[in-house]
Each structure stands twice: as structure tokens, then as C-alpha cells.
Image: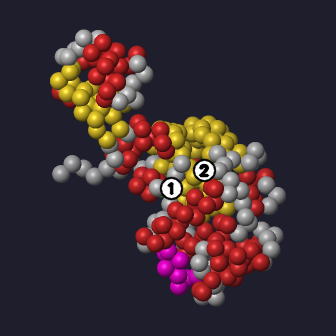
Amino acid sequence: MIEITGLTKRYGGKAAVDGLTFTVEPGRVTGFLGPNGAGKSTTMRMILGLDRPDEGRVRVNGRGYVTAALPMREVGALLDARALHGTRTARNHLLWLAHAGAIAESRVDEVLRQVGLESVARKRAGTFSLGMSQRLGIAAALLGDPRVLLFDEPVNGLDPEGVKWIRELMRDLAGEGRTVLVSSHLMSEMALTADHLVVIGRGRLIADVGMTEFVRHSSGVLVRADDPERLATALTAAGAAVEPEPGGALAVSGLEAGAIGRIALDAAIALSELTPRRLSLEEAYMNLTRDSIEFEAGAA
Ligand SMILES: Nc1ncnc2c1ncn2[C@@H]1O[C@H](COP(=O)(O)OP(=O)(O)OP(=O)(O)O)[C@@H](O)[C@H]1O
């Protein structure tokens, strides 16, 4: 489990991470989403003790990661797949890490097999494609058989087969009861992988929500009524979320069209439109993060 409380990191005068609080539970894949520059990598570096928070704290399995006696057995991480000595072979790179982390050499061949790099184990890592480097980075993360795993944008540069492989690996790792946090700036990637979503923008928490709930909230009903204000009050009282739309319509989520129709009937409000609509997950995510996009293409 990873517990993050009031985490803040400033560079110059600017907060890259701003009062973040959330928990990453074991046994499920948690997608860590946010637009470019949202603060995902900075948060991951602080979880690993590679950056020091200005405020707040991180606890991994109940304690500060930097205080762990054998950190590679506690947490495995893929931050930057290219961050390795290109002149070492894949196997020697992992052997070197195993020695540094007091991990049995036999694990090296096990993880090479697990990530499908056995046949190139004696090739120099510097000659690897990005996809192969990602696999080697994942092998390094798995080396200590840790209970907690962090992957920063692991599918960048992978072909569809590699993407599918990573997705299945993460699901398997979570299925074994491990804590898995994986960052991405694309909702489409997370839709098939994550059980839970933590969404941030400009360093702040935007949503901490189960995937099923996120999907439920991304669908809604468009309603036009002769008395939208009174209908909005009645629907809100029934537990729906109601947002005004341009032209006097209401966007309603949390209630099915049939239930909305009955509430309108009971309140003697005439409806001129009742249209169920379903946003794609990508659209729902864009709506959530619209206000926190740092760099946006100007309108043509
Ligand atoms: N070492 C640093 N020095 C100064 N600013 C930094 C440093 N590291 C990160 N930042 C700034 O902090 C903010 C958050 O960056 P971070 O890399 O954590 O975002 P991210 O969500 O991982 O983005 P991306 O998806 O682009 O990798 C950005 O505005 C970035 O420019």
C-alpha cells in the first residue's frame, strides 16, 4: 500500500505537486492519470525517495521507503527505460542490480524469462529497441519480487503486442495481491488496465475514483423541460448530478432516463427532450482535466 498525505513539491516558485492526498491499495491496478506536466513523475520520484517533498509525506507499506533496509524488495519501479549503461549486456545489468540489492542471482534468469528477453540476455542493452528497453526496465523492477510496483508511462513506444503484454502483466501482478501504480496521460490506455483511477492536474487531485464509477458518471441524459430550474431541484433531491447546458437543457447523471421522466411527471413538468447519451471515457477524462491542461494548441 502507498499512502500519500498532503504531498507538495515546488520548483522555483511553482508547485509541481500541490497538497496531494491519496492511497494506492494492494490487489488492484491504479491508473495515475493527468495531462503532460501534471506532476505524475514528480510524485513517483517522491514515493521512491528520489526527490524530497517540501511538505507532506509518503508511506510505503507503512513506512518511509528510504528507510527500508532492502528497498528493491519493497518497491520496484520503471521510471526511465533508457536510464542504463548501454555497454552492459541485459543480463549483466540485472546481475549488477541484484548484487547491489542483495538479491539472489537466480532471480536474474527468472525475470529475463518473465519479460521475454531470454534470447537477447547477452546482447548489449545499448542496442535494444525502446520496446526491449522497456521490458528490461520492467525486469529490473521485478527483480526484488517487491509488493509495490510503480510504472511511469510504461507503454510509451511499444507496439500493440507489447502494450497487450504489459497490460496483462500488470493485471497479473495486481492479481497476486501487489500494489500497482501506473501513470499515463492517455485514458484509452487505462480503460482496459486499471481498476481504480487517480487523476491529477497542475499537481492537484482531480479524482480518486473506481473505474466502474467513472464509467457510470461518464454516461448521462440530456433533458429539456418547460421549467428547468424546478426540474433541476427535483432531480438533485433524488440524488442526480445536474449541469446546465447551453440553450437551457440540463445534463443529468446518476439517474436513468425512465426515472427522470417519472420525476418530471410527478412534478407536473413537461419534457420536450429526454436523450440518453454516453461519453467515451476519453471525453469524460478530457472534461475532467480541461481546466488543468498546461500547454494547449491555440485555436486555428
Ligand atoms: N527537476 C525539475 N526542475 C524544475 N521543474 C521541474 C522539475 N521536474 C519537474 N518539473 C516541473 O514540474 C511539473 C510537473 O512535471 P512532471 O514531470 O512531474 O509531470 P508529469 O505529469 O509526469 O508529465 P509528463 O506526462 O509530461 O511526463 C512540470 O511543470 C515540470 O516542468
Relative image position of residue 192 (x, y in whole percent): 46, 55
Q: Give residue 148's quadrant in the image.
A: bottom right
Report the magenta residues as a range.
124-132
For the residue pair 103 and 69, the one nearer the viewer reads as 103
- Horizontally, residue 54 falls left or right of residue 103, namely left
Tell me, yes or no, whether the highlighted magenta stretch contains residue 259. Answer: no
Seen at 32% across and 17% down, the residue is 263
Q: Which residue is under mark 1? A: 193
Check contact, mark 1 vs mark 2: CB within 8 A: no
Measured along the vertical axis of the image, is residue 143 above or below residue 275? below
Pick whichever of labels 1 and 2 is earlier in the sequence. 2
Q: Which residue is under mark 2? A: 28
Judge the density around disc 1: few (<14), some (14-19), many (≥20) Cα neighbours within 10 Å.
Answer: many
Relative image position of residue 95 (x, y in whole percent): 73, 78
Q: Amino acid at mark 2?
A: Arg
For the residue pair 191 and 158, the one nearer the viewer reads as 191
Seen at 76% across and 44% down, the residue is 62
